[in-house]
Image: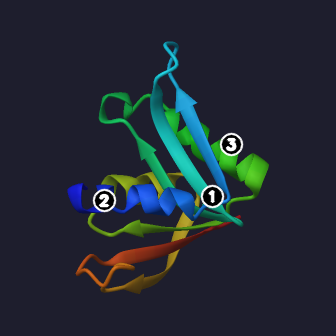
Amino acid sequence: VNNIKKYVPQAILGVSHLVIMENENHQPIAFMGIEGTKLEMLFVKNSEIGKGIGKKLLNYGLENYNVNELAVNEQSPNAKGFYEYMGFKTYKRTELDEQSNPYPILYMRLEK
């Protein structure tokens, strides 16, 4: 996670759509970035995980941006499980991430 954090600001600049969810105090608690129909990132504040926020964001992306593809770190089993629960299936796996680090990446598509 700490390794990924340093790439987030640059990655945010590379998406066409950035959706931010705020709490009742207008503090950001989650965000997702979408490019075309690909979910490029979805992050939920640790204290907000398990409250349905990721599901709300992803459903928003599905309904408003036709999101149908994403990539997830294989070493994040909770994220992988969440995307599978939401209907995504793995179609490809790589040994390295996009920065050539040894973090296997799963490429997933929405199964209808």
Amino acid identity at mark 3? Tyr
Amino acid identity at mark 2? Lys
**Pointer 2: residues within 10 angstroms few (<14), some, or many (20+)?**
few
Query: Which image quadrant for residue 102?
Result: bottom left
Q: Nearer the viewer, mark 2 or mark 1?
A: 2
The structure's colour scheme is rainbow
Q: Earlier in the sequence, mark 1 or mark 3?
A: 1
Cα distance between the residues tagged 2 and 1: 19 Å
> Image check: 48 left or right of 1?
right
Q: Residue at x 55, y 32 (%)?
A: 21
Q: Nearer the viewer, mark 1 or mark 3?
A: 1
Which residue carries the number 2 mark?
6
Q: Position of residue 11 (x, y in %)?
A: 48, 62
What secondary structure is found at the residue carrying circle 1? strand
Which residue carries the number 1 mark?
34
**Pointer 3: residues within 10 angstroms few (<14), some, or many (20+)?**
some
**Pointer 1: residues within 10 angstroms few (<14), some, or many (20+)?**
many
Q: Earlier in the sequence, mark 3 or mark 2?
A: 2
Q: Position of residue 39 (x, y in %)?
A: 58, 61
Comparing 23 with 14, the one in front is 14
- Whether tag 3 and tag 2 are in contact, CB under 8 A, the answer is no
> Image check: 62 left or right of 80?
right
Q: Residue at x 30, y 61 (%)?
A: 4
Cα distance between the residues tagged 1 and 3: 11 Å
Q: Is residue 9 above or below residue 92?
A: above
Amino acid identity at mark 1? Ile
Residue 92 is tagged as none
What secondary structure is found at the residue carrying circle 3? helix
> Image check: 48 left or right of 86?
left
Which residue carries the number 3 mark?
60
Cα distance between the residues tagged 3 and 2: 26 Å
